[in-house]
Image (cartoon, helix red, strand yellow):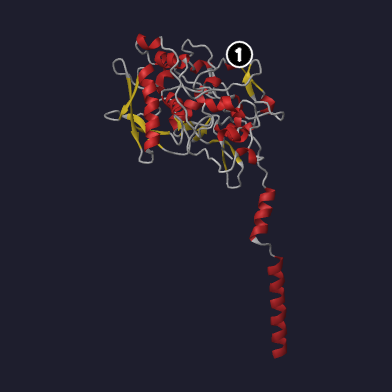
Amino acid sequence: MLAKILTFGLLTSLKLCALIQARPTQDAIDAIKSDDVVCKESCSTICPLGHERDENGCLICGKCNIRGMFEGDIIIGNENSYHQLLTVVGVKTRTRRAAQKNNEWPKTGDNVNIGYVFDDSVSRKAKRRVMRAIQEYNKHTCIRFVPKTSQQTYLKIYAGDQCSSYVGKVLPRGGQDMFVGDCSVGSIMHELMHAVGFWHEHTRPDRDNFVAIKWANLAKEHEISIRKLNPTEWDKLDSPYDYNSIMHYPSYAYGYTSEGEPVMTDKMGEEILAQRTRFSTEDIRQINRKYDCPARYLGGRSSPEISTKPMPSARTTSKPLAQKSSCKNTVSNCERLVRLGGCEKGNVLYLYMKMSCKRSCQMC
């Protein structure tokens, strides 16, 4: 009897072991699940900030991200700014044309007083750069960035990792975020121009008359960000297309072709350098026309070039640069780009310089 019981127990144990060994592990189950999931590669719905994704990482068509960064430095952080974005890129249309001025700051007398406060994260050096940028607005426009007093909506300036801002006034009250990172004075001027209501120059509706884009070489993630603004929602402000605008992107911002040519050029195929050292004449005129500034500002010429010094983050090496074979420039226009402030971490040319002008920027 005892032998039968032991035999039965042994057989049962063997069967259980076999079942356990045959049962797939959780990793195997997850692998099977992931192999079975077929994700859509694209959706017909246009989402400027991309679509939301499910737990498998698949696109959820019809469900758009409403918060994120557009064109590299434009903050979309609430429903109001997201619907503004949909409108200006032509995804939807406003029902009332008068709504165009919703993103303008209120004017008191001759001036537009925009309050600001610094977050504790902003260093003294960064504050000085912000104040130098503000001085340029005080000199050339009727915009006055002032320490916050009674303003219901104001700029809340943070350090952050990069330069970024909302476009125009997007909050009915409270602090509207702006980030200045390690940005140059000119790059902060660029962000403040976003803050007063301007988009990038190269996205104007008439852009195709002045800029050529090699669409076949454009990375998919850039397709929506290089989209032209909706002509019914854009005011030309009687200004011609301006390659020298502080709001224009450089040619290499959207990448290269396989032959090493920039995706975006002027109509002659020449590179567009862009600059972050001064207001252009048309920048000044557009700001003053947008806010109906007094006539004394409207005839202003381009502002003097702001001095640009290499940022502390541009490292030096104890060895002569020539001794490092990898420390070299791979393009011929590096010295010219250095003079435009391209080695500065907040400059729009910085990533291009980091790849192509290591020697000139002392980034080895």
32 sits left or right of 351 in the view: right
Query: How crowded is the residue under tag 1: few (<14 C-alpha within 10 Å), some, or many (20+)?
Result: few
The front one of 268 and 338 is: 338
272 sits left or right of 11 in the view: left
Residue 358 place in picture, x, y as percent: 60, 35
165 sits left or right of 319 in the view: left
Image-quadrant location for residue 54? top right
Image-quadrant location for residue 213? top right
Q: Is residue 43 visible?
A: no
Secondary structure of residue under mark 1: helix
**Number of numbered labels in the structure image:** 1
Q: Which residue is mark 1?
A: 209
Residue 214 place in picture, x, y as percent: 67, 23
Q: Quadrant of the N terminus?
A: bottom right
Query: In this picture, is 123 found above or below 116?
Result: below
Amino acid identity at mark 1? Asn
The front one of 53 and 321 is: 321
Residue at 58 percent of width and 47 percent of height? 55
The front one of 55 and 198 is: 198
Residue 144 place in picture, x, y as percent: 33, 22
The front one of 223 and 145 is: 145
Residue 299 place in picture, x, y as percent: 41, 9
Q: Residue furthest bottom?
A: 1
